Image (tube, rainbow, N blue to C red):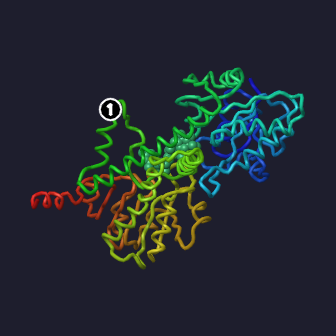
């Protein structure tokens, strides 16, 4: 049993704290947001994350997990202090480190015994050194501490499972003994562990996210080509994925990536590269291709409906991916903005993200379910592949629509079946593109 303090109670902090408590440790979660802490003490979570509430409540009831706004109280017994605060886009492409700086200073001021400070937030390369210097500057002189980078790879929507079954644990420090001590916290997870230096660990996080984002943009570029040449990108991805060097994951073409991580981290890596005199061409293309995916919806609707002015367009799904209520950088928000700019009326339904979407949009009609959104619409657009959309009564949807146009931005449905039902159905590069036209041109040549 170790005494662990986690600063930050959002996706990474709360999940990390809950998992360490569940492994038998004594955990305190610190957050500066008093309301958040008050609600957590009542077992109410600030985020929608499958299974997490149960683990938080179970461990809180067992006395292994508690929450406070006070660093003094939260750090009293701490042997390990995890920083898991937000590092949002600073508006210039870099990462805003103000929360990390505040956390580091607050740790230093509350330090009464030697600790290992572990950074889990995604931070620009060199931030571990910054944290070290802030703590050095603000602590009482005779207390020792070490800083370890321990990037987190969990995904929203499957945070708990990812935290308990990581593909690997990465630890980096100038103090190898400290990194090895942190490694002991993870021994029971029985996963590969990489111990390296501080900057390399920080870079592993950015490189991993950028690579995954690049895979998505790669398959989306292939999708755009498939669409023109009449090939089916889902089967192309399947055929590629069997190659062990490629693998099947993260090859789903669609409306591109969103969320609080990929867009921010690719941009931050580009910014770091440029600051260091590099020209990150591939990363720029990854972002450009992703931006263009949102336009696919508008272009395809225009192909079918012409002018979108006053057309009622129903969006199914608003969250940036299923199983989360997070709409940060969600494709839905850009699609809504494009549709509204074209004069369309937007109706939308999402199982859990409507509250968050309502806070950042205007003029959207939020509906009680998919059927209410689809009723009277000129087209339905599937934006997020929630499970509940897989088994919709599509006959009912079709019967209630003004025109039976269904754009499937995530290739959730089978096109043959939908077309048989009488939908004017279009998935992302599911074959049947203008291949005949291409063939004709070839014949002419
Ligand atoms: C991502 C990484 O997957 C995590 O490993 C990492 O820890 C996290 O960022 C982070 O840095 O905090 P997350 O953003 O929660 O996790 O979600 P993903 O499952 O990676 O999906 C990101 C976006 O890519 C979603 O919008 C999803 O719809 C899209 N995506 C994913 C595709 O368009 N195609 C795919 O094949 C896969």
Instruction: Decide if residue 129 is on the left or right side of residue 262.
Output: right
Instruction: Decide if residue 234 is on the left or right side of residue 388.
Output: left
Q: Residue at x 71, y 20 (%)?
A: 177
> Please, what secondary structure does the residue beneath circle 1 have?
loop
Q: Is residue 290 above or below residue 248?
A: below
Q: Is residue 57 above or below residue 378?
A: above
Q: Residue at x 78, y 37 (%)?
A: 133
Q: Residue at x 51, y 38 (%)?
A: 208
Q: Is residue 269 above or below residue 348?
A: above
Q: Residue at label 1?
A: 243
- How packed mark 1 is, by other alpha carbons closer than 10 Å (few <14, some 14-19, many 20 or more), is few
Taking depth in this image into account, of 220 and 127 the one nearest to the observer is: 127
Residue 84, given in percent of the width and then of the height, sits at 69, 41
Residue 226 appears in view: yes
The quarter of the rendered structure image containing the C terminus is bottom left
Q: How many marks?
A: 1
Taking depth in this image into account, of 405 and 261 the one nearest to the observer is: 261
Quarter assignment of residue 117: top right
Q: Is residue 128 above or below residue 144?
A: below
Instruction: Decide if residue 114 is on the left or right side of residue 246.
Output: right
Residue 357, given in percent of the width and then of the height, sits at 57, 62
The quarter of the rendered structure image containing the N terminus is top right
Quarter assignment of residue 306: bottom left
Residue 185, given in percent of the width and then of the height, sits at 67, 25
Taking depth in this image into account, of 225 and 322 the one nearest to the observer is: 225
Residue 156 appears in view: no
Taking depth in this image into account, of 228 and 136 the one nearest to the observer is: 136
Residue 339, given in percent of the width and then of the height, sits at 45, 70
């Amino acid at each position: 049993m170790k005494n662990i303090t986690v600063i930050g109670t959002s996706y990474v902090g709360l999940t990390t704290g809950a998992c360490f408590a569940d492994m038998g440790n004594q955990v305190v979660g610190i957050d500066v947001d008093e309301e958040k802490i008050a609600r957590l003490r009542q077992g109410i979570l600030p985020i929608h994350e499958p299974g997490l509430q149960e683990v938080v409540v179970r461990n809180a009831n067992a006395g292994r997990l508690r929450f406070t706004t006070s660093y003094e109280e939260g750090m009293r017994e701490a042997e390990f202090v995890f920083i898991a605060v937000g590092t949002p886009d600073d508006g210039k492409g870099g990462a805003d480190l103000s929360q990390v700086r505040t956390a580091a200073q607050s740790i230093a001021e509350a330090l009464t015994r030697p600790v290992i400070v572990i950074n889990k937030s995604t931070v620009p390369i060199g931030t571990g050194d910054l944290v070290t210097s802030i703590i050095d500057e603000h602590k009482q002189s005779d207390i020792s501490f070490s800083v370890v980078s321990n990037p987190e790879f969990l995904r929203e929507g499957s945070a708990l499972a990812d935290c308990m079954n990581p593909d690997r644990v990465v630890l980096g420090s100038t103090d190898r003994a400290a990194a090895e001590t942190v490694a002991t916290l993870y021994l029971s997870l029985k996963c590969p562990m990489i111990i390296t230096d501080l900057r390399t660990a920080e870079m592993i996080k950015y490189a991993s996210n950028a690579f995954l984002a690049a895979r998505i943009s790669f398959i989306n570029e292939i999708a755009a080509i498939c669409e023109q040449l009449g090939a089916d990108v889902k089967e192309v991805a399947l055929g590629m994925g069997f190659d062990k060097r490629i693998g099947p994951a993260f090859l789903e073409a669609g409306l591109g990536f969103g969320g609080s991580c990929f867009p921010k981290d690719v941009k931050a890596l580009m910014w770091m590269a440029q600051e260091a005199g590099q020209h990150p061409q591939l990363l720029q293309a990854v972002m450009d291709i992703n931006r263009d995916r949102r336009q696919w919806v508008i272009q395809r609707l225009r192909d079918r409906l012409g002018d979108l002015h006053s057309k009622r367009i129903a969006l199914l799904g608003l969250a940036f991916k299923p199983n989360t209520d997070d709409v940060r950088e969600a494709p839905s928000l850009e699609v809504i903005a494009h549709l509204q700019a074209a004069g369309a009326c937007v109706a939308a339904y999402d199982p859990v993200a409507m509250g968050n979407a309502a806070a950042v949009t205007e003029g959207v009609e939020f509906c009680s379910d998919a059927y209410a959104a689809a009723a009277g619409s000129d087209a339905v657009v599937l934006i997020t592949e929630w499970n509940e959309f897989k088994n919709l009564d599509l006959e009912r949807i079709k019967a209630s629509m003004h025109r039976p146009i269904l754009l499937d931005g995530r290739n959730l449905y089978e096109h043959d079946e939908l077309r048989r039902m009488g939908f004017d159905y279009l998935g992302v590069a599911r074959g049947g593109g203008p291949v005949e036209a291409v063939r004709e041109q070839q014949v002419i040549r």
